[in-house]
Amino acid sequence: MKKIFFFLVRLVLLLVLPFICLIRGAVFGHDYYELAPWLAILLGMGITALLLILYFSFIYGRITGKVGSARSFKLRILFAVFLVIGYSTYAIVYLSDSNVKSPDIKSTYSSLHPILRLSISTVIFIDKSLLITDGKRQPEDYKKMGLKTNRQSLHYVQSDGYVHAVDIRTKRHGEFRNGFLKLYFKLMGLNTLRHVGTEDHLHISLSSKDKPGGI
């Protein structure tokens, strides 16, 4: 029983590791090298593709007992690259209407930094009930909510052309689920803050060189 348990744990970790490499790799490129948004994404994709090539080569070796020819290795590379590009494109571009609070928020989803979109789409596979309650804002939006204008807000479009903050609903959800979401985004290298002011939500943000320490 213990062997089965540890086998399942290792299997889950192996399955989850490519997604961690994809998002953490992109965040690393953004935070430490200040790469442009799509270059940071490409870094994460490159790391993930290399990991998948190792996976496929290991599986191939276990099945055949051989390293394989140059042709088979090229096929592994192409398959890994195809998978990473396909998944990343889908995750960054697509968002279901059921995962946004309103059509207005859905219409501004493309203005969200691609790393944030990638991390949100990935966790939606586990939590289908995830709901984005806010994304892009203007200074006057704070006045409409009865709040003081936040000049350091990462909900504004930054110099890279993208919004660096998004809000996710926590209201009417259990603390275990909300805690899991917060832990997930932290593990992915993103900033998290629980707000219980205007509406209970989890504020997720990606650092911006325009507003160091901004939220």
Image (tube, helix red, strand yellow):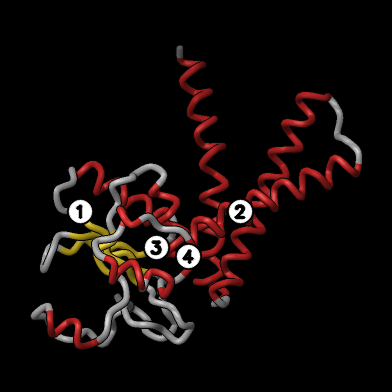
Mark 4 or 1 closer to N-term?
4
In front: 146, or 54?
A: 146
Q: Say whether marks 3 and 1 touch (CB < 8 Å).
A: no
Quarter of the image holding residue 70? Answer: top right
Which mark lies nearer to you, 3 or 4? 4
Mark 2 or 3 closer to N-term?
2
Q: Is residue 39 above or below residue 141?
A: above
Q: Amino acid at mark 2?
A: Gly
Mark 3 or 1 closer to N-term?
1
Q: Say whether marks 2 and 4 touch (CB < 8 Å).
A: no
Q: Say whether marks 3 and 4 touch (CB < 8 Å).
A: yes
Residue underneath mark 2: 86
Mark 1 or 2 closer to N-term?
2
Which mark lies nearer to you, 3 or 1? 1
Residue at point 77%, 31% (across, down):
60
Is 82 on the left-hand or right-hand side of 173?
right
Q: Secondary structure at mark 1?
A: loop
Residue 211 coordinates in the image, percent (x, y): 36, 84
